[in-house]
Amino acid sequence: MYWVSATLAAIALGFAYYGLNLMYDDSYSNKVVGGDAYNFIIYAARGTAYVSTGVVFAVLSAAAAIVGHSLSDRVAQTGQQASAS
């Protein structure tokens, strides 16, 4: 279960990094519409969407780590009970 958590954390970092780069990209070669202010608003909205997706994956990663930890504790306790009998 830890590999699931690590994978989700890596995805979260990727989305967050891409979103921040997209939000603060001030190059004028990627114009969406004619006005500069509109382009900045569009880039900020897209970047916020990617960063928010990264936050969702980070929460899923933390949940997977917690579930994996609790499952490993249960397996360890079950093994101890079986060996004690």
Image: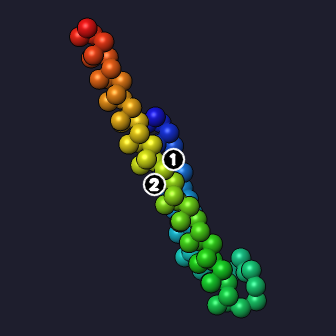
Cβ atoms under marks 1 and 2 closer than 8 Å: no
Q: Is residue 16 left or right of residue 28?
A: left
Identify which residue is drawn at 62% across, 84% down: 40
Q: Residues within 10 Å of mark 1 (few under 14, many from 20)?
A: many
- The residue that mark 1 highlights is 8
Residue 57 sits above or below residue 76 on the image: below
- The residue that mark 2 highlights is 59
- CA separation in Å, label 1 and label 2: 9 Å
Q: Is residue 17 visible?
A: no
Residue 75 sits above or below residue 31 on the image: above
Mark with earlier residue (1, 2): 1
Q: Quadrant of residue 23?
A: bottom right
Marks 1, 2: nearer the viewer: 2
Residue 26 sits above or below residue 13 on the image: below
Image coordinates of residue 71 in percent, x first then y, are: 39, 32
Q: Which element is circle 1 on?
A: helix
Q: Amino acid at mark 1?
A: Leu
Q: Quadrant of the C terminus?
A: top left
Q: Amino acid at mark 2?
A: Val
Identify which residue is drawn at 35% across, 35% down: 70
Image coordinates of residue 36 in percent, x first then y, are: 67, 89
Instruction: Between residue 31 and residue 48, name the one nearer to us.
Output: 48
Instruction: Between residue 56 and residue 14, name the one nearer to us.
Output: 56
Identify which residue is drawn at 55% across, 76% down: 24
